[in-house]
Image (cartoon, coloured by chain):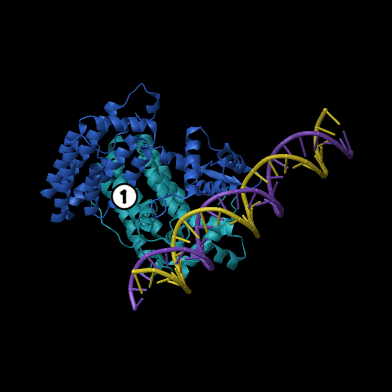
Chain colours: A blue, B cyan, C purple, D yellow
DNA sequence: TTTACGAAATTGGTTGACCAGTTTGATTTG
DNA sequence: CAAATCAAACTGGTCAACCAATTTCGTAAA
């Protein structure tokens, strides 16, 4: 994205091609259509396709060979990238449990009066959104980020949030997401957030750590509950390795 | 780099331009020479320069604006793109401290006899590599991964390792990396690893957690020590937010 | 003098043609 | 029949010309 929010053409093309790699079952080493084929197919000049290929190459999806063709990246490159984008929601939640509970505990000692006030406002936003039946994923996210900010660690939390958000594009994840926000779990999560805030207000590190852990554990259980075990799309997401409990 | 080790032309050009940004004192927001200017100056076609600009844009160094020109990345772009997806070494070490110390603590209860034996072998590999003066980044990595594997959490650790490895391409990181492996810090890190293993062997969770934390803290201090504060390339990496201590 | 306008210059965006390696497969040669 | 050869076809690499958005700057209007 450029700074004004618009995308350059090559980026759009690269994204559509990346989607294609993911959806059409390309495997590492497979030959990808040539620049010419795609330019004809999409009705654009080869230079544009070429620029998109460069982006895909930089991001590790493609291996471009002069005179031969382009191949879906193999070996080290792909295993890293595939694995990266192949995080399931459960793995990500674990990461969040580990990171955010530690951070919440630490925040108890660094948080300022004004941080507390901001968190209260965020909580109020969440409450109103639920009352009005609005979606409002924003306030939930803001709550977590603001705690991280209080400890100068928002980059980390933000990064994991990014991975999480990336997942939202997949069909299976979208369905889960919808169900979660359609149901009333959010009210119980609001209570969780309030508990975290209460612990922070009393500067009780251990309590804050536990509260955040429990909150994300509740989210995990909800996710598990909503997942259809029979649904093949959920394959690979149901195995939930357990991490260090608090 | 392509898979056969050679570089595509646009990459060489992009690297020379990146060097130029670093060496000629460009600051965020400064206007960069136009594609035409550079193509004339280097005696190559504008397409090549354009491809190089795309690479620089993807890596977060440039902000390309149609009709206006290209500018050294400023504001959101640099802070969001460079700092978010391209963490500095210190941020990554924090992530590792949070994740791996929790995991090490948990591993104390899940680790099996055969895991212990494998870890011992890995440690032996490390010891021999140091004796022979070999580089051997592999054994160090393996030690950390194997502990994560014992708790079924290797995906997470692996992901953070990936981000770490990504950094190795930047000039500043490469220099750090070289200095670390040239010096004898590795011996002290071997002792750290041994301490973690010892704690795991006695199934002492708290001790394992602390040992892993301390190990990564030692790495962090070493990194800090080796960093040249005067070096402009280190700007932005020296600020080290503190995270929850054990 | 200040502001508003608009043409001209400058910028990145896009295209099609041609260059240079690689692969392919029919043909020659042993 | 098998191996070597080599030319044709296919690939990505490079280029110069033209298109479209933005900026610039002189001019005219207020």
User: Relative to A213, is C10 above or below?
Assistant: below
Residue at the far top: name it. Answer: A230
Residue B206 in view: no
Residue occupying the point 37% across, 27% down: A234
Residue occupying the point 30% across, 38% down: A93
Residue occupying the point 48% across, 57% down: B56
Residue B83 appears in which quarter of the rendering? bottom left
- Camera-side residue of C4 and A109: C4
The x, y position of residue A211, in whole percent, is 17, 41
What kind of element bears circle 1?
A: helix
Mark 1 packing: few (<14 Cα in 10 Å), some, or many (20+)?
many
Residue B216 in view: yes
Return the residue at label 1.
A156
The x, y position of residue A42, in whole percent, is 55, 40
Residue occupying the point 40% across, 56% down: B186
- Camera-side residue of B130 and A222: A222
Residue A239 appears in which quarter of the rendering? top left
Image-based side of B76 in relation to A202, left or right: right
The x, y position of residue B117, in whole percent, is 39, 39
């Amino acid at each position: 994205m450029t700074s004004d929010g618009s995308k350059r053409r090559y980026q759009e093309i690269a994204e559509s091609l990346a989607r294609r790699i993911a959806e059409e079952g390309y495997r590492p080493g497979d030959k990808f259509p040539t620049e010419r084929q795609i330019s004809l197919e999409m009705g654009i000049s080869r230079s544009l396709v070429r620029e998109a290929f460069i982006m895909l190459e930089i991001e590790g999806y493609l291996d471009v060979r002069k005179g031969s063709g382009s191949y879906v990246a193999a070996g080290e490159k792909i295993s890293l990238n595939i694995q990266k984008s192949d995080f399931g929601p459960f793995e990500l939640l674990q990461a969040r449990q580990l990171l955010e509970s530690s951070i919440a505990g630490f925040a108890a000692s660094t948080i300022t009066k004004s941080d507390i006030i901001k968190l209260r406002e965020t909580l109020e936003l969440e409450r109103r959104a639920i009352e009005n039946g609005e979606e409002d994923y924003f306030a939930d996210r803001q709550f977590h980020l603001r705690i991280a900010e209080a400890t100068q660690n928002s980059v980390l939390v933000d990064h994991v949030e990014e991975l999480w958000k990336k997942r939202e594009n997949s069909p299976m994840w979208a369905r889960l997401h919808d169900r979660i926000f359609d149901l009333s779990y959010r009210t119980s999560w609001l209570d969780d957030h309030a508990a975290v805030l209460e612990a922070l207000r009393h500067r009780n590190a251990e309590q804050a750590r536990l509260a955040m852990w429990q909150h994300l554990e509740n989210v995990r259980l909800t996710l598990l509950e909503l997942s259809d075990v029979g649904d093949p799309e959920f394959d690979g997401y149901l195995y939930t390795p357990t991490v260090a409990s608090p």
